[in-house]
Amino acid sequence: MSEHGEVNLDELYREVVLDHHRHPRGRHPLPRVDARAHGFNPVCGDEVELAVALDGERIAGVEIQGHGCAICTASGSMMAELVPGRSVGEAEAQVETFRSVMHGGTWPTGSDPGDLEALEGVKHFPVRVKCALLPWVTLRDALRAWRQGHAQAETTSEEEGAP
Amino acid sequence: MSEHGEVNLDELYREVVLDHHRHPRGRHPLPRVDARAHGFNPVCGDEVELAVALDGERIAGVEIQGHGCAICTASGSMMAELVPGRSVGEAEAQVETFRSVMHGGTWPTGSDPGDLEALEGVKHFPVRVKCALLPWVTLRDALRAWRQGHAQAETTSEEEGAP
Amino acid sequence: MLAPSPQASSFDPKVLAAHFPILSRTVHGRRLVYLDNAATTQKPDTVLAALARYYTTLNANVHRGVHTLAEEATAAFEFTRRRVARFVGAPDPRGVIMTRNATEALNLVARSWGERLSVGDEVLLTEMEHHSNLVPWIMLARQRGVALRHVPIDDNGRLNLRVFAQLLSPRTRIVAVTAMSNVLGTINPVAEMAEAARRVGAVVVVDGAQAVPHLQVDFAALGCDFLAFSAHKMYGPTGLGFLVGRPELLEMMQPLYGGGEMIREVRLDYASWNDIPYKFEAGTPNIADAVAFTAALDLLEELGMDAVRRHEVELTGYALERLASLGGLEIHGPRDASERGGLVSFADPQIHPHDLATILDTHGVAVRAGHHCAQPLMRRLGVPATARASFAIYNHRDDVDALVEGLRHARAYFGVGGAAS
Amino acid sequence: MLAPSPQASSFDPKVLAAHFPILSRTVHGRRLVYLDNAATTQKPDTVLAALARYYTTLNANVHRGVHTLAEEATAAFEFTRRRVARFVGAPDPRGVIMTRNATEALNLVARSWGERLSVGDEVLLTEMEHHSNLVPWIMLARQRGVALRHVPIDDNGRLNLRVFAQLLSPRTRIVAVTAMSNVLGTINPVAEMAEAARRVGAVVVVDGAQAVPHLQVDFAALGCDFLAFSAHKMYGPTGLGFLVGRPELLEMMQPLYGGGEMIREVRLDYASWNDIPYKFEAGTPNIADAVAFTAALDLLEELGMDAVRRHEVELTGYALERLASLGGLEIHGPRDASERGGLVSFADPQIHPHDLATILDTHGVAVRAGHHCAQPLMRRLGVPATARASFAIYNHRDDVDALVEGLRHARAYFGVGGAAS
Ligand SMILES: Cc1ncc(COP(=O)(O)O)c(C=O)c1O
Ligand SMILES: Cc1ncc(COP(=O)(O)O)c(C=O)c1O
């Protein structure tokens, strides 16, 4: 959006994104919760309640509630599809990869971003980047809290344009 | 000085003014002191130590010490010459007259400003007006304190351009 | 000069718009339709010229210099103080303190007047306050054990004055209320509230950040003790705000900041304060922006605040009507444009305000989406955020039409059907 | 662009002067010779253009908006923070807090870090501090019963470092010192002092108001904890200052002001804070002036602070020489130009500085006369006031000559004979 010319809204709201937004995955309560985090974007009011069930070092399931814009909702929904089955380390790596893509990077060769690829266009809308990232940084913080023996973490999506 | 053209320094530093500055009157200690005030101009550091001897309602003598610029010194010196012999009420009236002249007024017809007339040019140098007024407002405050039964007052010359 | 005649009964916003250079820029290839005026307004060419004139002809530090530039800069700076006093009907310019913004003005009162409060005392606020009129009091409550009370709002976004009357008591030491809500648009009956507050001996603080730019506000007539507002929301530069206070109260208050300008005498371990307003203005002030701000006041005085208000009521009425015609939008605040300031907060139950704002932006339409620094009010309204369109003197019906057109597009995009075409 | 080449080893002040529009004005029919730069500097056309550009192309409120203008304004505003960090060698831009001026920056530290101090603790200052680095500590002493100590100066206007070492003790919790005196010109050995202070566990606060505009100041290399300075003294706009702090310390500190921007979550009776630096920046900041300030930094970086310093040493040396040649003037501060910043305070024993300044003004020469916000130092020097000529990048020898010529005239006028012709 920094260029003053026309922008393509379809880059932001790809069909896959709108579909996740309309039918978000991961809304079902988990039978057991091992880690939790609450994510909040004070700028726009997006809120994410995240619960993670673990099977040893492996993520068994993710539940995501809260309310947010289409980008935030879709990103959380994609996460609920993508991370179950991965190890905690793999999930953390995926958070970092997605972050770097949102901040202008590209997907590493060989990586399989799945539906998340459809969010790549968000990087051209800097103020929306934190919407896409909120579920993911909340996941990172839930896992970090779990590693440290806490059951709950508080997350705030980074301030846009922070120094 | 507000006009951007040439100004005439001689309007500010009239010969009479420079003479008072070089040979200030009123420096001799008074035999008896009935009222005192300390005047201070925090902007430029001018300081006036004023002592007044009264003979009933009449000013018997004035002593003025301290340090200040030429304008302040001359103004105090003129005061030491002008006020002895006047009643407290007359002296207070003279303070007000001088104030109004400095703020753009003129001497009332029939008034006898004495050497003070030579300070009239100061009004064209707004930032110097408070230098000329400092001894006088200090006198006013000394007399006011005396009326109220105090022996000592503290004065600050008005901030230039104050609202 | 911008208006057809002094105190004209109406003005042409399109003619005015031509004097706001930024309005001729495009955004994503579209004409900029700036509807985020409650956040900050745009600046007329006269303000920009005044800024440039200050820096190219009289820039100097104020109050301390003997030389010509210092004298001229001081005179211009103090002239602004008198102009501001006149603009808001404050009888004494010594009661006008220059701050960075309305927020600093409110904090100054909360901290400095707040020193007089202690456990058992109450501060009465409302549910519709901006964070800037909530957080300073929350800080005070933490520091001094003061209790906070809040006047609730009704479902039309108006203060419940019956409850206000009940909450007022001799324990109420301060009533702090916004004259106009930045979310609901509600114009509060501040004069009436101030009168009731005075009867219990409370000090009245008015947040005028939204009201002063858009309504005739008369400090003396309001009967309040303190009034805070920001220049940048009224066509002036950023970095300048005002606390207008009753001089008797300001004289009783301690300064928060020490330094140059605010002192009378300083020794290594002792300092005494200058007179008001200077004792609250430590260090070099924002001289240039203060001087340039007079050009914004000129503009508002020339148009006349009555005409400004009429224009905004008219435009808000039109916006309410057009938005209602879309069908299915939630519109917050009083229904009647004459009861509200020139802004409309709305939400589409099926499109998040954030998405709305992004889509509108691609149409060149700038609106705000979020909590508008009023998180407690969002909670009260039961929404995470709203979208807000807010108007200024240069907005016209075309801008509202662009907004509505953008909203239609957003709905089509998200596959949301409206009631109307 | 203004300098012959990037990081040029020297520059032509007359070429620079052409870029400062105000310098072409006249005062009382004479060319303006502006020698009051320590009070505030003049602004180059590039800063004025940047200001105008901001307001005519990207003005919007920052951090809260989704629309294009808000995004662009936020990016420009945050860019300034990074530029300032780089300019003063602060490794982390999160440690750069925007304030109104240096005074506010110093008060922020005194109030907020000062909350950790109590009876028995000491704050170590010096006899040459500006009121802005004295009064905040006097206020702290009153509030918390902290004791103030002062490093004395010797007769050459230098700090007595032996006494400094003696005054330092485990009770010393804060050392607050100016990097350059605004009266004496003395450049203090801040890095050395900071090292000694750190050994006793004291926090080091540096008043950089005079040093940052004229010397290469490297926050990390100084080893201090806080550094304060003002944009308006370094060719930038009024209304903008900076507190640069070590992020670890800033994170431990409480904000002074509450409101928009500085919060994370607000409920009616609860609030939590945003991250640094935002938690210290309540309300709408001075966006335009912050954005425009980068043009001033561009200028200084282009010239190179080494060249700036060399120019000022050269000019100060010339001024000291010419003033000495007049005979009979009292000149304060270190004798050697290389030990001092670009300013000279002087007094004629027979002409009050106030009268000198008025006469110089009629020659178009702007100098400051007074206590320079350093009343305790005036007392230490045993003078009621001094006259001060202070230099900037656009001053040249002709300006010094005009000063000397004016002084000659003043003496003739007052009938004071000098030793030289
Ligand atoms: C009602 C209200 N109060 C206070 C403020 C704070 O204004 P500022 O950010 O200029 O301090 C605002 C604007 O954001 C507002 O709308
Ligand atoms: C040494 C010193 N410290 C602090 C200040 C205060 O700067 P400001 O007035 O910009 O806050 C000044 C300038 O007046 C100064 O010279």
Image (cartoon, coloured by chain):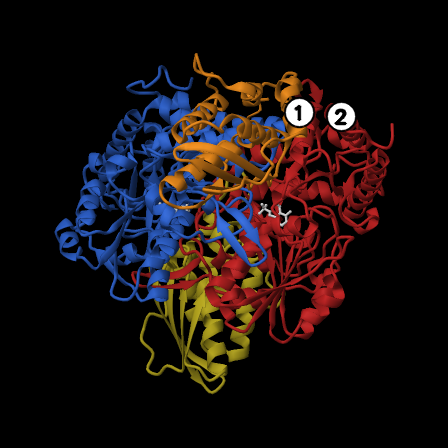
Chain colours: A yellow, B orange, C blue, D red
| Residue D211 placement (x, y as % from top left) | 70, 50
Classify residue D383 as left or right of residue D312.
left
Return the x and y of residue A84 as percentages of the image width and height.
45, 76
Camera-side residue of D16 and C394 = D16
Q: On what subunit does the disc labeled 1 rest?
A: B
Where is residue C340, by image quadrant? top left
Direction from residue C327 to residue C85 in the image, left or right = right
Q: What numbered label is drawn on residue D31?
A: none
Q: Which residue is mark 1?
A: B18
The quarter of the displayed image where residue C73 is located:
top right
Whether residues under marks 1 and 2 lie with C-beta atoms below 8 angstroms apart, the answer is yes
Q: Find numbered disc 2 in the image and state the secondary structure of the residue it sits on.
A: loop
Q: Secondary structure at mark 1?
A: helix
Q: Residue at x 49, y 35 (%)?
A: C290
**For the residue with label 1, is its CB less than 8 Å from the closest atom of ligand 2?**
no
Residue A33 vs A42, above or below: the answer is below
The amino acid beneath tag 1 is Leu
> Residue under mark 2: which chain is it in?
D
In the displayed structure, does residue B9 sit left or right of residue B82? right
Question: Is the residue marked by circle 1 packed among few (<14), some (14-19), or many (20+) residues within 10 Å?
Answer: some
> Do callouts 1 and 2 point to residues on the same chain?
no
Q: Which residue is mark 2?
A: D415
Find the distance from the CA under tag 1 to the CA under tag 2.
Answer: 10 Å
Instruction: Name the residue located 81 percent from the left edge and 29 percent from the top edge.
Output: D417
Q: Is residue A50 above or below residue D319?
A: below
Coordinates of residue D88 in the picture (x, y in percent): 68, 54
Label 2 amino acid?
A: Gly
| Whether residue C59 can be seen here | no
Looking at the image, which residue sits at the far top? B109
> Where the C terminus of chain C falls, by quadrant?
top left
The residue positioned 75% from the left and 60% from the top of the image is D189
Q: Quadrant of the N terminus of chain C?
A: top left
